[in-house]
Amino acid sequence: MNLDPLDIAASGGTVLTANKRLARELVRQFDRRQMAAGLAVWPSPAILSLSAWVTRQLQLLRREHRLLTDGQLQRCWELAIAADAATVHRDLLQLPQTARRAREAHLLLESYCVDFLPLDGDEDQAAFLRWRSAWQERAGREGWLDQGSALRMVTAAVADGALDVPSSLVLAGFDDLTPAVTGLCRGLTGRGCTVSSWDTPAVVVSQPAMWPCSDPAEEVRSCACWARALLSARPQATIGVVVPQLNDYQPLVERIFRAEFDPAGCLAGDEGPEPFTLSLGTPLAREGVVSAALRLLALADPLRIEEIGWLLRSPYLAGAAHEWADRARADRELRRRGRGSWTLAALQRTLRRLPGVARMADVIEVLATKRHDRRRLLPGEWCEQFAHLLAACGWPGGRGLHSREFQAVRHVKELLGQLAALDRVSLPITRGEALALLQRLAAETVFQPEGAETRVQILGMLEASGFAFDAVWILGLHEGALPAPPRPNPFIPLPLQSRLRMPHADALREGEFAAKVSRRLFAAAPTVILSWPHQVDGGLQRPSPLLRGLPTAALPPLVSVDPARVISSGRVPLELLDDAVAAPLTTRKPFAGGTGILKDQALCPFRAFAHHRLRARKLDAPDVGLDEMARGSLIHVVLEKFWRDARSQTALRAMPDEELADRLQACAEQAIARLERERRCDLPPRQRQLELTRLTTLARDWLAEEAQRSPFEVVEIEKEHVETLGRLIIKTRVDRIDRLTDGRVAVIDYKTGSVQVAQWSDERLTEPQLPIYCVGAGAESVGAVLFAVVRSRRKERGFRGLAATQGLWPAQEKALQKLLTERGWTDFRELCVHWRTTLTALGDAFANGVATVDPVERHKTCRYCDLVPLCRILESGPVIETGEGDNGE
Amino acid sequence: MASDPGIIPGDGAVRRQALAVGGSFIVQAPAGSGKTELLIQRILALLAVVAAPEEILAITFTRKAAAEMRKRLLDALERAQEETPPDEAHAVETWQRARVALARDRERGWGLLEHPARLQILTIDGLCAALVRRMPYLSHFGEMPSVAEDAGELYRDAAERLCTRLEGNGPASAALQLLLAHLDNRLPLLRDLLVAMLGRRDQWLRHLQSGGAATARAALERALAGYVRQALADAAAALGSERLTELMLVGRWAAANLAAAAGADNPLAALLDRSDPPGIDVDDLPVWLAITSLLLTSDSSLRSPRGLSVNLGFPPGKGSPEAEMKQRMAALLDGLNADPAGVERLLALRRLPGCVYADPQWSVLSALIDLLPLAVVELRTTFRQRGQIDFTEIARGALTALGDELAPTELLLQLDGRLRHILVDEFQDTSRTQYDLLATLTAGWERGDGRTLFLVGDPMQSIYRFREAEVGLYLRARTHGIGDIRLTPLALSANFRSQADLVNWCNQLFPRLFPAAEDPVRGAVPFVAAEATRPSLPAPAVTTACFAPRDDRTEANRVVDLIRQARQDQPNGTIAVLVRARTHLAAIVPRLKAVGLRFQAQEIDPLSDRPAIQDLLALTRALLHPADRVAWLAVLRAPWCGLLLDDLLLLVADRPEATLLECLAEASTPQGLFTGLPAASFRRLERVAPILAGAVSRKGRLPLCRLVESTWLALGGPAGLAANDLSDVDRFLALLDELDDGGDLLRLETLTERLAGLFAAPDADAPPELQLMTIHKAKGLEFDTVILPGLGRPVGKGDPSLLLWQEDPDHGLLLAPLPPAGSDQSEPTYQALAGIHRDKDRLETLRLFYVAATRAKRTLHLLGHTTVDKEGNPAAPASGSLLHAVWETLEGDVRYFSPDSAVQPPESSVRPGLRRLPADWTQPGLSASLPVVLPGGRRASGGGQHEPGRLDLSLRGEEGRIIGTAVHGWLERMVRDGLEQWPVERLASERPSLRGEMMGNGVPQARIDACLTQVMTALENTLRSVRGRWILGLHRDGACELAMTGVVDDVPVHAVIDRTFIDGDGKRWVIDYKTSAPGEGESVGEFLERERERYRSQLDIYRTLLMRRNPQEEVRAALYLPLIDAWCEID
């Protein structure tokens, strides 16, 4: 029997739909019909979803408050499962999801009016039965209802006359009528109500045809272009796009339909109304404003640097609109300090000292004072606290809310309400538990901003039932999608599911269901296009068996109006120019940047320009623990402090072991304290202790090396020099200068990484620090140029470099000789001449604004360079690393 | 696949045997032997005998392979519906078998072609997931979580959380302190090492879970000692007692000679005063080491008899005993020279682990044994928090759920009853967990019960060690079977792919490269020769080119020449350039592009190397972080804006701390005109700056990928890009969408890290005949011509591991912790295990070479480099390189190339210029949006329209709504029941159900009473008030909650009217209830005025609808406010 539900509604009958969407659609059709008939006013029809109707009946029975909300039910089941798990010590990774699945099983059993015994099931099913009886026992005690028992109650009330029944009732859009619903219908019929079922719009003559595509993207693109063409030709048409695997297709569908239907709108990036209606929303938790609230609530103490960065960048906090620039600078500054995490207290103190971020400091203070609360409270009380915290942090900020944001914020309030509603079923819980519940609610709540219905409806397979369209396109009909692979509920014995033909039970049932649905859908409109992708994620696919024998569609040429394609095919010739020299320096004062400028200039002129004139530097990304830079500078400082006191090798040698140990301990203490002062953040005690030990050990090992050298005196430590190199003047520091026995000096640079002495002789002089000093001081006075490699591994420790003074460092002497021979020079003086020439050229080039992109070794120099996006070197080809990274994957 | 039926392979009998449905087999199927076809034929054969298709389970290595096998199987079944057999001979067998299977399908009513899901063809991960899904409880998972694309981030999270316990008081702290000290206090290093360990936990976890550190030491040292004893026994057996006795005799003499000279440093000291041959106890080790000193040089080669000198205890002398002893020793050495296996055994003695752990070493090991399980616990917490797991966890879950042989779970028993045939493809690349899973699934099977296992693979092609594949498991299964199931080993030998010369070349080369004997511990697999079925071709099958010295550009030129030559020889032939690591293509890709050869590169070009992607990355970073100066400057220099360096200098004008947004805002003020910015640049800024500022102000309002995409479009980002660039952009945007965190990114660095793992799409317009890919990607493919460049490059070393482990089937687990960071000495146990791992790697590299070489159908080109000596003569290639491995065999046939002098100028001089849109560029016209909005209904009460303004976050607003709903409901009920049923006193008795309603609707426990009071007040007020009683009373034509629809402004409007009736004067009333009350300090008069205005339009609509319904009626509208019993008529 296929009575038109609209007729029934018009005659005062009731129409019950499988879902809300169809109810809305039928109301719309009803209204349209009334308007077409010229009516100006009419009673609203009784068209509603079955579950809304059940609730309404409970209201009439004055039982509706006994029906728990979905959230409450979910919580009850979670508690039941958790209690069970605790008794058998089984820790389930996904408790909420398990509860959902178990509830589904429970509802299935209720809907099919069946049950099974523990003996008939496996262990999983036995566990389910335990959970279920725990729920049923509790529900019975409290008088609570769930969907299944509510329907039973209404059915009984219908049967025994406690409820009035309409004269006629039609069930619309049910692909399956479960025994429970059939029972209700029997009851209604018994009371004289005419019950019918309807699932297809008036039969249309349709010509389904298939359209093979190479992959899902091409499929969606074809569909969107087709729909646009169709609507351009027939503006009054309605189009249904049905997607059996809507979850997988959703991102593609949204993107491509937006691009093809509203190309200009894609550029605006506004939250305007969508040009299509999609039956799926996105999780509420993904909305910016909601995610901000959840993160704010979840912040712990200490904060990780990325969380701090997030706070400082978020537009949803108090003062963001005014402090944004200073906050961004504050983040850069905090990152510079190299700490991977900050306590709230330290962070607040630090922010108070940084310019322009007072309101942010206030927010941190709020977070710090609303510290971790260890009480156990009812969810509702936590809600109050959460709401207070959010308000105190100024959430959702002063930017002014957009329509979409406003709706999302309203949803957050509703969520808090839902959480509070758990008071009814919950015992006091910890803050963490309450927050986890809120997060889960937000993740599970589907958010769909309100908007007008459109002519393009994008629906899942089940939701499409009952709709009438002028044209339908069904996407993704490959073999794996239709029939869907069976997915029986694990909590009900398989044979039972198969016997009763429960949804998703087995391949047979899925096959029959697919056949039934496709019979309906393939005839849902005069035009039906069925597409399938040859490939999904690289795997070959065959078309669904249900497409067998269908003709291939004859579609007109599909024209894309996607803005990306239109703009890129505009064929504008790009200008190509050489932009390698900028304005010269005008200052004659020392230029900030020190030897780093020349080092960068040598590595790549562009790098020096960008780092030192544009002051472009990447944001630091502090890691856990101490970074290598800090570790290097710590040992620097330890040695600096030691030698400031000791001054000579004689003193070192004369020092008793114990005194040496004490001094090193003190130096290490001071070095760490200095680092802590600079960063305004103390090291955690154990890390600090470990570092102290490391520093003293390393310094002691190093000093043992120093004790074995020929005698020396330390004459300079970290002294500043001003050097002029061509047109460039810089300030520079040398780590240490020793006076040797022959009166000449050894210039020393501490290194904790690996060193390459060859860098001193290469054309570009990529390690210029010591050469700069030598050029300034004059070749005669320098006896040795040395890296002091201070490393824990003995083989790697020691001096590396060039020695002109004879007899002190044989290996370094040899290195110098080798270098001189290679270059055809006679002595160290000539090397210094080379240095002077090179350094002068580098200084001049920098001062003259030379900013050529010319890395000394493309693969090495560019690999870790932070300027790759700015210098545009990739325009001339990739910077593939030549490393021997193996495994091909 | 064979398309030439000309030659019938000699292994036909083997193939027929493999299709015997009653037997269990392990099949070695070398390259080109038609393995997939055999599998399909076997499945078809099984289908012909099973009761249901679900009894067969086929397991493939990748999802792609599963999809392909399913497709081929179904295609075969479909083809079998036709009566005419196929023309190709090899297809006939498949067709025939498919027809039998199809007949069975019809007879049993399976409907396989209608229900293809009944064919169980899964990857091992898919199987595990299916098992876990069936056993949410037993697997300890609950519902199946999603599987992380990049589990590294999960490991990192867990490892870092574990590291924070350093400062805590738990047991982890001590262990962490010890390890950190051990690692030079490098926390990031410890974290990274832990991350690496977590990724491989399926290998070590089961070893660490039983017992604790205390009980472990004895067992572990037993295993070490067992391993050492085994090595000694092997050496003893290799030498033989006769030789050993002789050695002892000569050795003792030499030792005595040395004792005088060398004293304590005598390497042979252990031989002094010793006449018996050494036993095989660990105490005997020093004697054995002395023997190796006698026989082997310090660089581990056999001594030459000429090398016997006084330094070794053989003083010169012509007579006895000097000459005699020297001669006897020389004879021993000669004998060993002919026995390389014996030498190998002796050499192994120098790489033995220690037999006990030194205390410091043990303390590190025991810290690890304590700590690593804790890391796993943290990982589980991470899994729980993120709702994501890794593949290992699924497999572990599946194993847990199945139970084991002794305690099988219900599910295993169920599966046991149903599964009758399991087929596994690529079994050589199986991992330990997968192996265990297979063993568990077949645990209940008994020999001869008709259930079969069919394992197919080629141990010579096992190349997935980095994914935990253990080829030793294949060898073990072949020898011992799996569980109780014995597997009949079968070996296919026919090669349907390569021309005879190539097959023969392989048959000659590989036996020399591959080890002679199997060794499951080291994954040593001997070579098995193939039998050519295709004729020889005239052209040379293999060429070898060697570049001396290394010159990648010359090599790239050679590759180009070879491609052109192959094109000429065979215009439609397929060509592949295969490399061990994609970085080996660094010089080749640009060269191919330079000469205009188009190719498809599979996962070769990193996405982040594309300028278009770098620009998008910069744009993303800029939009998210105002102080990311590099990103902002890059955005201004990108083609869509194209500012010059001078412009940028002027713009930032010596303000190192300013954000570019601030600079831009200033530059665009009237004063900004005086910065000196040229007019053209100013125009560029004028177009771009507002777009950027607008985008920044929208952050958070829309998903990040949309924020970036819309900005990019508005800027003109796509201009000048090719179709391929656009598909790269799509990939980038998809990544953004995946990482989106509320329109932002939490860790900005994650984007760069993840981007590094993505590759540009292959050039869709390039012909598929020329492909570039890694050898791993080429597995299973074939090409007419295969070019293998970069063979001269040494294989990289792996990273150190916190813990090395090796399972020895005979002695148990060998374990060694990483030596301390600052230590110089090598630690023998760690070294020994590292040595085993190096052996495994070396053997796998050779197999990789085999895979590469066997991809070729016609021609194989080997290219590599070597160094040159001072005279410019080529030396042997770097050890560890593939070229080195094949050197001896090939040297004669190698063609040498010295660097091309005529190559193009060095690439670094190709200066990147600035590419940009013209200053006057304008957006091309875009199509208008389609007007697609459907005329729809709206609600009269105005729901859905937002009222921007002050937002009350507290829950009171929500409570107000709940109170309102409750009051409406109860007032409706009173009308329905009739007022006479509702004396005021009755209210008190309704309190409990009202309370239930409040709770159910979400009023927090603490607020229930307050809300309840409000509702009661409203209801009581109404019942007590004259006006209230009049409203609720019985009237003509009255209704509550009257639902009406009417057309207002051409739109249907839905209204629900709280109360309406016709009063005694014949006037119709429309009354709306409002449960609001005056605000603080607000007078009732003011309040009512406010409410009146607020609801006027709503009530006007109601009035209109009712007047339309009955134009004769006079309709009046009013608000009733029960909380304050106020009445407010709307005029």
Image (cartoon, rainbow, N blue to C red):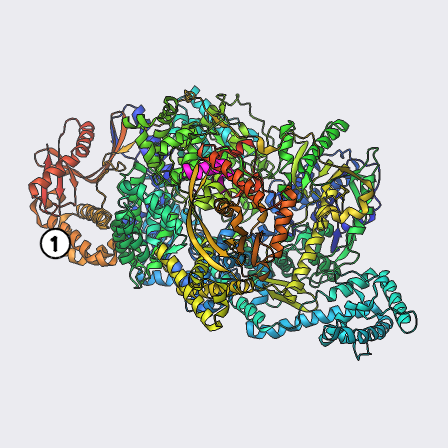
Q: Which residues are magenta?
A: A599-617
Residue marked by disc 1: B984
Judged by its main secondary structure, the magenta piece is: helix
The location of residue B383, given as percent across then percent down, is: 47, 56
The location of residue A124, given as percent across then percent down, is: 50, 60
Q: Is residue B857 magenta?
A: no
Q: Is residue B59 visible in the rendered structure shown here?
A: yes
- Give the side of residue B1075 with respect to residue B340, left or right: left
Looking at the image, which is closer to me, A149 or B739? B739
Query: Vertically, is B699 above or below A124?
Result: above
| Subunit of label 1 | B
Q: Residue furthest right?
A: B319
* Screen quadrant of the N terminus of chain B: top right
The location of residue B11, given as percent across then percent down, is: 82, 47
Q: Amino acid at mark 1?
A: Val
- Give the side of residue B123 with respect to residue A121, left or right: right
